[in-house]
């Protein structure tokens, strides 16, 4: 019996209700032997609060089973129950989420016997390879149903933002909402030349994706200015035309950060729209989802920033348990020791871990060979690593900042903008004002490239062991 099966037993058989996000957290963490103190440190919830919710959960389970359930005997009691009742497990946790939220019954099986696609795009909705990072998914699905909400999804490149977003938008569509997704990477550089041109591009894109005819000239007024014209266009035309909520997803918002004059008007405008939802029914139809890979490095007043309101979701790296879970879904006969060896090289980066499992599943390479060649031109990450190196070669200041992080034995303070850009690439992790290289794969490969290209003599560095 694994934790997904335990969750299904508790929710669908014993309690006949969905657990709250914190109850799920407690059940999952208790299953692997974590203490309430450790749960508190990891989640941000107070230890006293976690203990109270946990105590009530064990009481509810004891009542349902007719036997005493505690944090310590959870494994034994649920396993005995399933053996006696012959409970049939066929769903993983993601399937339950999708059936409730997206409205589809996917029942994906594990990857054994299935053709696995190369992990270069968002994980498909019906895939068994999507790993939940509780309580993020449940919080997102619930928040998007709230009138006038703002949801901010932040994570470096290839950390799973698009996979989460696709599930949110699919669920919103199933709920009868209109969904529009705008990706600022699609905008030509000329679009950012003036605020007026940028906002007109923005409005036309939203209009066409709603399958409406653009009517900017009927609402745009030079005397009132671009921001007011944009507001009137949304309020008087787009939102007024809809009889249902509109989920507006803005992807790669960090592209806007690169144009301070645009950002200093556009971002406060989004904050103002959110505030209008507290006053009028029309703006309550709008639900904003802001997706970005780095912190905003434009100076904004606290009362004008959209990044201090609404629900903030930061996608963390996978834990060792989640890496182990993903290995099983790939159909690998995987051990905890192998998880530790892989994570010593790539951390819990979802893309790097998935790419390793893809090649291991195809039996193209052993784990020992994979780790040995990982930070080289012959390894499975060569294309990914060369892409990062190409960017650094074109940006001397960025390369210099990363060089400092690589040379540091631990964390180091970097220029703020350089640190944010490196974080967006996934090359460093920020801890307050300090940055450290995010994994040994990047440290070893990029150190080697810098030594070759610039004849740099780095201080002697002893990486964590990743041998097998």
Image (tube, rainbow, N blue to C red):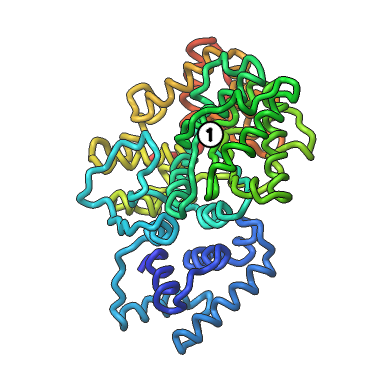
Q: Residue at x 38, y 35 (%)?
A: 121
Q: Position of residue 299 (x, y in %)?
A: 76, 29
* Among the 4 quarters of the image, the one containing residue 258: top right
Taking the image as shown, residue 306 lies to the left or right of residue 345, namely right
Q: Position of residue 426 (x, y in %)?
A: 53, 32
Asked if one can make out residue 134 in the rendered structure from this viewpoint, the answer is no
Q: Residue at x 59, y 48 (%)?
A: 285
Secondary structure at badge 1 equals: strand
Farthest-out residue, left: 113
Number of marks in the rendered image = 1
Farthest-out residue, bottom: 66
Taking the image as shown, residue 143 lies to the left or right of residue 274, namely left
Q: Position of residue 250 (x, y in %)?
A: 55, 35
- Is 134 or 361 nearer to us in this picture? 134
- Is 158 or 240 nearer to us in this picture? 240
Quadrant the C terminus occupies: top left
Q: Judge the density around disc 1: few (<14), some (14-19), many (≥20) Cα neighbours within 10 Å.
A: many
Q: Residue at x 75, y 21 (%)?
A: 223
Farthest-out residue, front: 218
Taking the image as shown, residue 321 lies to the left or right of residue 148, namely left
Q: Position of residue 348 (x, y in %)?
A: 47, 43
Quadrant the N terminus occupies: bottom left
Residue at label 1? 251
Asked if one can make out residue 240 in the rendered structure from this viewpoint, the answer is yes
Q: Is residue 373 above or below residue 9?
A: above
């Amino acid at each position: 019996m694994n934790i997904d099966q335990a969750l299904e037993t508790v929710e669908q058989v014993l309690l006949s209700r969905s657990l709250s996000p914190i109850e799920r957290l407690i059940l999952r963490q208790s299953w692997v032997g974590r203490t309430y103190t450790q749960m508190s440190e990891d989640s941000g919830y107070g230890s006293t609060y976690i203990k109270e919710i946990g105590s009530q959960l064990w009481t509810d389970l004891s009542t349902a089973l007719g036997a005493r359930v505690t944090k310590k005997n959870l494994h034994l009691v649920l396993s005995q129950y399933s053996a006696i009742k012959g409970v049939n497990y066929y769903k993983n946790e993601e399937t339950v989420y999708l059936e409730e939220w997206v409205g589809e019954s996917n029942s994906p099986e594990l990857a054994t016997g299935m053709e696995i696609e190369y992990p270069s795009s968002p994980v498909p909705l019906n895939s068994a390879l999507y790993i939940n990072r509780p309580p993020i998914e449940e919080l997102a699905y619930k928040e998007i149903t709230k009138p006038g909400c703002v949801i901010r999804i932040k994570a470096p490149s290839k950390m799973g933002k698009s996979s989460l977003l696709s599930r949110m938008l699919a669920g919103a569509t199933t709920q009868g909402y209109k969904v529009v997704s705008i990706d600022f990477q699609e905008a030509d550089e000329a679009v950012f030349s003036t605020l007026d041109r940028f906002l007109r591009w923005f409005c036309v894109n939203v209009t066409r994706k709603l399958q409406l005819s653009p009517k900017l000239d009927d609402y745009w007024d030079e005397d009132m200015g671009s921001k007011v014209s944009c507001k009137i266009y949304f309020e008087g035309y787009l939102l007024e035309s809809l009889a249902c909520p509109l989920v507006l997803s803005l992807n790669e918002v960090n592209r806007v950060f690169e144009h301070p004059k645009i950002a200093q008007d556009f971002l406060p405008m989004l904050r103002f729209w959110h505030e209008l939802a507290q006053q009028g029914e029309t703006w309550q139809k709008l639900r904003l989802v802001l997706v970005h890979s780095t912190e905003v490095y434009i100076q904004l007043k606290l009362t004008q920033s959209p990044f201090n309101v609404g629900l903030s979701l930061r996608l963390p790296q996978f834990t060792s348990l989640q890496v182990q879970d993903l290995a099983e879904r790939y159909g690998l006969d995987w051990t905890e020791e192998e998880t530790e060896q892989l994570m010593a090289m790539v951390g819990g980066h979802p893309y790097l871990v998935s790419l390793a499992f893809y090649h291991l599943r195809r039996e193209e390479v052993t784990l020992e060979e994979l780790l040995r060649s990982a930070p080289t031109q012959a390894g499975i990450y060569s294309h990914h690593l060369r892409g990062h190196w190409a960017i650094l070669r074109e940006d001397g200041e960025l390369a210099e900042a990363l060089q400092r992080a690589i040379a540091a034995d631990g964390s180091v303070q970097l220029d703020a903008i350089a640190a944010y850009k490196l974080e967006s690439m996934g090359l460093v992790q920020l801890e307050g004002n300090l940055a450290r290289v995010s994994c040994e794969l990047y440290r070893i490969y990029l150190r080697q490239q810098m030594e070759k290209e610039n004849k740099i003599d780095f201080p002697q560095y002893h990486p964590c062991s990743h041998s097998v």
